[in-house]
Image: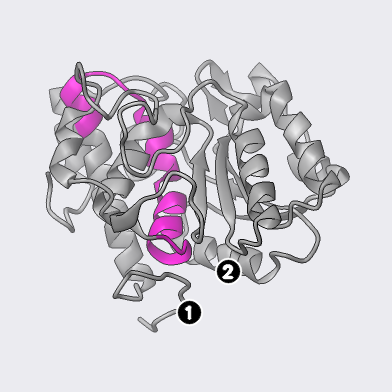
Amino acid sequence: MQKKTNYLKHFDNIMTINELKDVASQVRRDIIRMVHGCQSGHPGGSLGATDIVTALYFDQMQIDPKNFKMDGAGEDMFFLSNGHISPMLYSILARRGYFPVAELATFRRLGTRLQGHPTPVEGLPGIRVASGSLGQGLSVAAGVAQAKKLNGDNHLVFCLMGDGEQEEGQIWEAAMYAPAKNVDNLVAIVDYNKKQIDGPTDEVMNLGDLKAKYESFGWKVYECNGNDMQQIVDTLNITRKNAHKGQAQIILAHTEMGFGVDFMMGTHKWHGTPPNDEQAANALSQLKETLGDY
């Protein structure tokens, strides 16, 4: 596999697409084991969004995991708006070196730093804001991106949102704000799996033409298959090339909830349901162990 252009600093290896896929497979194993271990959490969306965030942390973002700073000065920053898919983020942060991989075993345990929704209260490296109250992440990311511009910091800010989350009014306040203030170092991503906790998004609250809506607010909109690593990397490369050119950017990443585990795909029922012993074993049999289980 040909090596790719890569924007990482403080990371020795430029990863191939197949190597990124291997990381994503291990992250999916971590997700299943974490949610099964405590019998609580959200496997469906976590599995579906894994490829996107793996590409960000292992291919795209200029970050320094060993020297984490809350203000994020001099590096790219990521904000998870739909915080209920925390097991995915925790696994990626651990695998990227923010904290020990063994700590994943404490997910949702009493007194753990790995709470059900991420929070900075316990000082977990990689977490800068509490998230899980849906609709807030884009506002945070837009404000941080604007602060970077005011401070002369040319790094980018990324924000992942859910598609069901697009039903929140605060999303659209931020969607107006970013283009109006030329926040052109912001890249938003919608995990567009078309499902939410109560069913398909088009039945719960039809989003209509999401691409046209963001374009009407002044965003540059891209679409890709959010479970195709090559497409994700290619699209993220385009957003970096087009950053700082006067327009906020957003990717509608079409994903499958539960991706990688056949019986979790095609349904919203695994949004917040942990697998039992038999189901967990079945799921793990479908996911290659590539970096070693914790």
| Disc 2 secondary structure class | helix
Cβ atoms under marks 2 and 1 closer than 8 Å = yes
Q: CA distance from mark 2 to mark 1?
A: 9 Å
At x 43%, y 59%, the residue is 55
Residue 174: give x, y in percent of width and height.
73, 35
Q: Name the quarter where the C terminus is drawn.
A: top left
Residues in magenta, as a range: 34-63
Q: Residues within 10 Å of mark 2 (few under 14, many from 20)?
A: some
Q: Which residue is mark 1?
A: 5
> What's the amino acid at mark 2?
Asn
Q: Earlier in the sequence, mark 2 or mark 1?
A: 1
Q: Which residue is mark 2?
A: 237
| Disc 1 secondary structure class | loop
Q: Place residue 144 in its image quadrant.
A: top right
Viewer can see residue 265: no
Nearest to the observer: residue 248 or residue 1: 248
Whether the magenta-drawn stretch holds residue 27 is answered as: no
